Image (spheres, grey):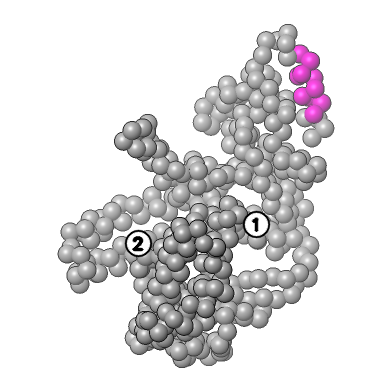
Amino acid sequence: MQRLQAFKYELMPNGGQQRQMRRFAGACRFVFNKALALQKTNHAAGAKFMNYVALANKLPDWKQEFEWLRQAPSQALQQVLKDLERAWKNFFERRAASPKFKKKGQREGFRFPQGFRIDQPNSRIFLPKLGWMRFRNSRDIVGTAKNITISQAGGKWFASIQTEREVEQPIPVATTAIGIDVGIARFATMSDGSFVEPLHSFKCHEQRLAKYQRRMSRKVKFSKNWHKAKRKVQKVHTRIANVRKDFLHKTTSAISQNHAMVAIEDLQVRNMSKSAAGNADKPGKNVAAKSGLNKAILDQGWFEFRRQLEYKLAWNGGVLIAVPAQYTSQTCPCCGHVAKANRKTQAKFECVECGYENHADVVGAMNILARGYRAAACGEDGSGLVRKRRAQPASAKQEPAEATRCEATHV
């Protein structure tokens, strides 16, 4: 089994190296935007789509037109064009939105596929056109280094080294399966009744962030005091992100080590957190309430939670199954009856058919686990929507109720 893993370290460059890295990142951003603009113009004219090779052939002409591009490493500029081609491919296959122009100060970085050297015993890295640079050697690098990505975040520079190595097919130590229902009041509720309290990283630092943002808004833009205030805002944002990452990594590591199969809801977080403001012709309803809900959803980090669970379970020999989320909290796990009236409140579940009572999130997690079993055993989507039935008169639902109980017993 081939395992790809990245090891990220904080760099400690000198002043000259920092200036050079900012220039390299700016050159990569310029090439990306120029290639994207060329693609859009080409598409508007009805011409054929330009692939990586066609765009890479234009690099020498761009370097003659803009001499400062020659200072940047050629392989870093080529990697930017490969990233653009991958972004278009994801867009055409409907995995992502169309590529957008990059802005200065956002996700600055560049990548070297070769030419770098790592001297870990002495805690230093050699980068083309930058020379040797020290880094904070926090852990050993395992595997063969394939490429290195240099990025800037929160005023600091980082190196992410992607490695590749062959490992034996992992065999899960744990033998249990669990369903997880994510939410706002409870970050993750398990089908066994346990739950993980939410961290609310952004909410805990929201007032402090707003204070520094107000100070920054009162400064003359791009002045020295404005840059000082901006660094404080960046520091708070970095703190929020680091706290959330630490929480998610610890939670997903514990779950992946203790369970061989995990079933979760296939949530479309992007659609769930869309703005409800609308436009001038069709203004939205309950905009303030929806805005608060969107902020709470994004503060939880549901997508990152699922992403980390997926690869950590694979590393431990487990499996992650995503099932449809429809009616998970309205379906009775005892008799299979589906009705909106089953969920009395946000937290209370009481079946109107058989009287089963439990916490609504626990019921949702139990139904998610049952759908995961069906998906793993039969290859279905696991939703069980064919068993869905609304509240009907007692005479009309006697026969379907028997069939539902049989199916629930079979599951």
Position of 231 with respect to 80 (left or right) is left
**Residue, x 67% and y 42% (percent of image)?**
323
Q: Residues within 10 Å of mark 1 (few under 14, many from 20)?
A: some
Residue 190 in view here: no
Residue assigned mark 2: 236
Q: Amino acid at mark 2?
A: Val
> In which quadrant of the rendered image does the C terminus lie?
top right
Residue assigned mark 1: 310
Q: Amino acid at mark 1?
A: Glu
Magenta residues (range): 398-407
Task: Please identify, in this view, whether the residue under mark 1 or under mark 2 is nearer the observer.
Answer: 1
The residues bearing labels 1 and 2 have C-alpha atoms spaced at a distance of 29 Å
**Residue, x 56% and y 28% (percent of image)?**
348
Along the viewing direction, whichever of 114 and 330 lies nearer the viewer: 114
Residue 255 in view here: yes
Which quadrant of the figure has residue 229? bottom left
Position of 166 with respect to 266 (left or right) is right
Point out residue 18 in the picture as x, y percentages from the top left corner: 37, 82
Q: Secondary structure at mark 1?
A: helix
Q: Are marks 1 and 2 in contact (CB under 8 Å)?
A: no
Point out residue 116 in the picture as x, y percentages from the top left corner: 55, 86
> In which quadrant of the rendered image does the N terminus lie?
bottom right
Point out residue 377 in the picture as x, y percentages from the top left corner: 80, 44
**Residue, x 75% and y 72% (percent of image)?**
167
Q: How many marks?
A: 2
Point out residue 125 in the picture as x, y percentages from the top left corner: 51, 87
**Residue, x 66% and y 79% (percent of image)?**
143
Q: Secondary structure at mark 2?
A: helix
> Secondary structure of the magenta portion, mostly?
helix
In the rendered image, residue 403 lying in the magenta stretch gets the answer yes
Which quadrant of the figure has residue 29? bottom left
